[in-house]
Amino acid sequence: MQPTHQAISVGLLTPPVWSLLIALEPGSPCGTSSRAVPSRRVRHDGPVEFEPYRGELVAYCYRMLGSFHEAEDLVQETMLRAWKARDRYDHTRASVRTWLYRIATNACLSALEGRARRPLPSGLGAPNDDPGAPLTPAFDVPWLQPFPDARFDTGTRADMRLALVAAMQVLPPRQRAVLVLREVLEFSAAEVAAQLGTTVTAVNSALQRARATLTDVGDAGEVTEPDDPGVRAVIQRYVQAFEAADVPALVRLLTDEAVLEMPPVPLWYRGSRDYGLFMRRVFETRGTGWSMWHLTANGQPALAAYAPEPGGGHRLHTLQVFTVTGGRVAHNVVFADPRVFEAFDLPQQISSGEFRQAR
């Protein structure tokens, strides 16, 4: 799927090209403004490339914001700011990567000013004990979104998992930035202090507080990768049970305390019993004959669920992101937001023949 914004060609900017672009800017003598063109140019030994950093910057902004779409927009803004400030870049003081992260961090912190955090339903209250409760969406809540792994090669996976990103949304924005920059991206305390315009002491203090807040999130090592053979086997059995509307088989694949949540619906369930009762309700309401597509999101196994259409074929219903631990499904976050479907480039409808061919 093509991005919704118009990409700026900032991937490769040599000094001669910079001068040409300056001359064609609206603020130059060749444009529509009388603003003077700066006479000083910072020259470099070679081209300055921005585009190779786009993927990791999108992942960074996603961790900060909890929204894939907003992350893409802010990275585009970062690229634009970097392009406009190219004459002020000094390669003797910081690498291009460090410089871009400083710009992206400032953009994220500005975007987060006065904004509510992006939660999952399990972060808003106690679990529901009525599998027949009305499924009323709360569109006024800025829900956490999943990250489409296929769109970018982010290099790291465990630190992208939904539970950790959701927990990070509780942190104050500057603590969030320190945690990601130091723990995930492995910038030094001095580099992070320069990026945030603060001191090394303040960075170390913020990191300590952030770690303390996230002590209950769990060990990333407990969550296996989606391409692990054992995980693939569990997800394949889940697909077979789901497509057969076999609730007992689904329940056998769950941990005793399995969690099911469904943003934008604010309620959630804990326990294999309530999980199974809710799934029985789904099949009674929407019928059998579902079809599932395998995906990954946030470094976790995911499935696109297609519900059967009365006239034949299937329509996209939900995107489900799984946490598998100890050979069982421990958590399933079910997304029904059309914007999430767009981010994963999922077709809205598909014929039975197309589904068989895709498999």
Image: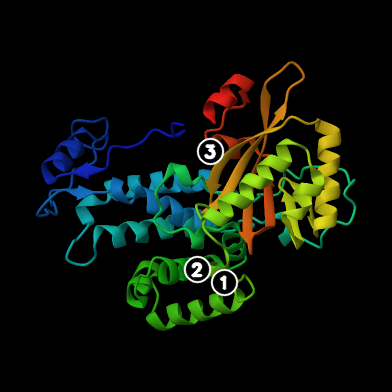
For the residue labelled by badge 1, is the local secondary structure a helix, a strand or a loop? loop
Name the N-terminal-most of marks 1 and 2. Answer: 2
* Residue 44 placement (x, y as % from top left): 12, 54
Crowding around mark 3 (Cα neighbors within 10 Å: few <14, some 14 to 19, many 20+) is many
**Residue identified by numbered label 2:** 174
* Residue 111 placement (x, y as % from top left): 51, 54
**Residue identified by numbered label 1:** 219
Given the image, on which type of amino acid does mark 2 rest? Arg
Residues at marks 3 and 1, CA–CA distance in whole angstroms: 27 Å
What residue lies at 19% left-to-right and 30% top-to-bottom?
Answer: 30
Residue 49 seen: yes
In depth, the one of 220 and 345 nearer the eye is: 220
Name the N-terminal-most of marks 2 and 3. Answer: 2
**Residue identified by numbered label 3:** 344
Q: Nearer the viewer, mark 3 or mark 1?
A: 1
What residue lies at 87% left-to-right and 43% top-to-bottom?
Answer: 134
